[in-house]
C-alpha cells in the first residue's frame, strides 16, 4: 500500500516461484478499485538497481545501500502517483529468492505467498525455457530499466539473442537466477527446472520464518483456482480493501491442476522426484 497523501510505503508483494499462479493473482487483485501496479507483469531491473552485475538473483540484506533503498522506494511512490492508486501490488518471481532483501527496503511490506505442486510447476517451467521471443513483452519491461543501466542491458539482450539463435531456440537463462550459469553445466532441462522450483520455495520459506506472520497471507495455487472468490475475499481483507460487487475478475479455472503428472513421461518424473520430494513433502504435497 502506498498512501499518496503522505507517501507512506507499504507495498503488497506477491511472492511465488515462477509458474505458480503469481500472474493470475496480480491480474485479479489489480481489478479491485484503488489497487494498481506497473504496466508490465515484472520489474526485475528496478529490483536489481545497484546490483545488476550480481551473477544470481539471490540478493542479501548486506547488498541494500541507502541509495538503493531510496531508488526502489521512489519507484513505488512514482507509480502510485502516476496511476493514482493507493495500493500498489508488485509481482516479480525472482523476488522469491530475495525476500530478506525486500524486507530491508520495505520493513512494513505485506506479502501474498503462493505455492503450487512442484511437478506441475516443473513441467510448466520446462515449457518456458524453450519459449519463443516476444518483442512486445520485452519492450514493456525495458520501459522500467534505470536510465544509467540501459547500455548494460542492451548488450546483455543481444548476447542472449545470439545464444538463443545458436542453441536452436533454447534460452540462455529463463526465470529466477537461482545459481550461476556455469553451475547448470551438464544438467538436463528437467533437473534445472526442478531445482529452480526448489530454490525459490526453500528460500522463500526460510525468509518467511523470520517475518511476522500477520504480514504474510499464504495460499496454494490449488486453493485459489478451485475457489477463487473465497480466496479473493480473504486477500482483500488482508490488504485492507473492499470489493465492489460490480468488479469482474479474470476467468480462473482448475484445468492445470495435475498437468505435470499428465504431461511428463515416467522417466522424466523419476528424474525430477528425487530433487523435489523433500520440498513437496515439507509443503504438504505428495510425489507418489
Image (cartoon, helix red, strand yellow):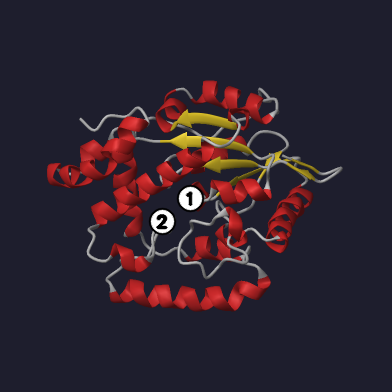
Mark 2 in CB contact with mark 1 (< 8 angstroms):
yes
- Classify 106 as above or below 258: below
Report the quarter where the N terminus lies. Answer: top right
Task: Report which quarter residue 36 is drawn in.
Answer: top right
**What is the secondary structure assignment of the residue under circle 2?**
loop
Q: Position of residue 94 (x, y in %)?
A: 49, 52
Picture residue at 39% right of the left edge, 48% below the top: 199
Report the quarter where the C terminus lies. Answer: top left
Picture residue at 50% right of the left edge, 26% below the top: 228
Q: Position of residue 187 (x, y in %)?
A: 24, 60
Q: CA distance from mark 2 to mark 1?
A: 7 Å
Count all numbered tags in the image, as a single digit: 2
Q: Is residue 271 left or right of residue 108?
A: left
Q: Decide: few, some or many residues near mark 2? Use Cα within 10 Å; few <14, some 14-19, many ≥20.
A: many
Residue that carries the numbered disc 2 in the rendered image:
178
Q: Nearer the viewer, residue 62 or 283?
A: 62
Q: Decide: few, some or many residues near mark 1? Use Cα within 10 Å; few <14, some 14-19, many ≥20.
A: many
**What is the secondary structure assignment of the residue under circle 1?**
helix
Q: Position of residue 115 (x, y in %)?
A: 43, 36
- Classify 198 as above or below 213: below
Extreme right residue here?
5
Task: Report which quarter residue 148 is drawn in.
Answer: bottom right
Q: Is residue 218 left or right of residue 233?
A: left
Q: Is residue 104 left or right of residue 186?
A: right
Picture residue at 47% right of the left edge, 35% below the top: 114
Mark sitting on residue 97: 1
Q: Nearer the viewer, residue 105 or 164?
A: 105
Amino acid at each position: 500500500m502506498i498512501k499518496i497523501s503522505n507517501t507512506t510505503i507499504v507495498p503488497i508483494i506477491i511472492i511465488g516461484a515462477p509458474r505458480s499462479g503469481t500472474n493470475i493473482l496480480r491480474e485479479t487483485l489489480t481489478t479491485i478499485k484503488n489497487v494498481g501496479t506497473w504496466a508490465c507483469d515484472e520489474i526485475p531491473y528496478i529490483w536489481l538497481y545497484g546490483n545488476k552485475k550480481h551473477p544470481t538473483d539471490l540478493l542479501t540484506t548486506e547488498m541494500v545501500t541507502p541509495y538503493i533503498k531510496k531508488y526502489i522506494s521512489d519507484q513505488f511512490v512514482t507509480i502510485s502517483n502516476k496511476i493514482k492508486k493507493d495500493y500498489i501490488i508488485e509481482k516479480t518471481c525472482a523476488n522469491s529468492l530475495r525476500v530478506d532483501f525486500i524486507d530491508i527496503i520495505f520493513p512494513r511490506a505485506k506479502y501474498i505467498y503462493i505455492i503450487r505442486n512442484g511437478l506441475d510447476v516443473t513441467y510448466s517451467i520446462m515449457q518456458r525455457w524453450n519459449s519463443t521471443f516476444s518483442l512486445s513483452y520485452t519492450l514493456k519491461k525495458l520501459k522500467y530499466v534505470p536510465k544509467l543501466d540501459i547500455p548494460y542491458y542492451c548488450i546483455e539482450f543481444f548476447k542472449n539473442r545470439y545464444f538463443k539463435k545458436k542453441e536452436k531456440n533454447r534460452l540462455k537463462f529463463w526465470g529466477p537466477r537461482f545459481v550461476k550459469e556455469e553451475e547448470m553445466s551438464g544438467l538436463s532441462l528437467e533437473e534445472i527446472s526442478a531445482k529452480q522450483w526448489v530454490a525459490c520455495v526453500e528460500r522463500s520459506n526460510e525468509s518467511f520464518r523470520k517475518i511476522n506472520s500477520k504480514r504474510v497471507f499464504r495460499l496454494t495455487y490449488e486453493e485459489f483456482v478451485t475457489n477463487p472468490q473465497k480466496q479473493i475475499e480473504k486477500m482483500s481483507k488482508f490488504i485492507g480493501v473492499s470489493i465492489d460487487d460490480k468488479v469482474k475478475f479474470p476467468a480462473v479455472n482448475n484445468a492445470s491442476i495435475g498437468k505435470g503428472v499428465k504431461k511428463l513421461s515416467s522417466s522424466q518424473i523419476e528424474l525430477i522426484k528425487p530433487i523435489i520430494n523433500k520440498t513437496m513433502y515439507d509443503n504438504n504435497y505428495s510425489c507418489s
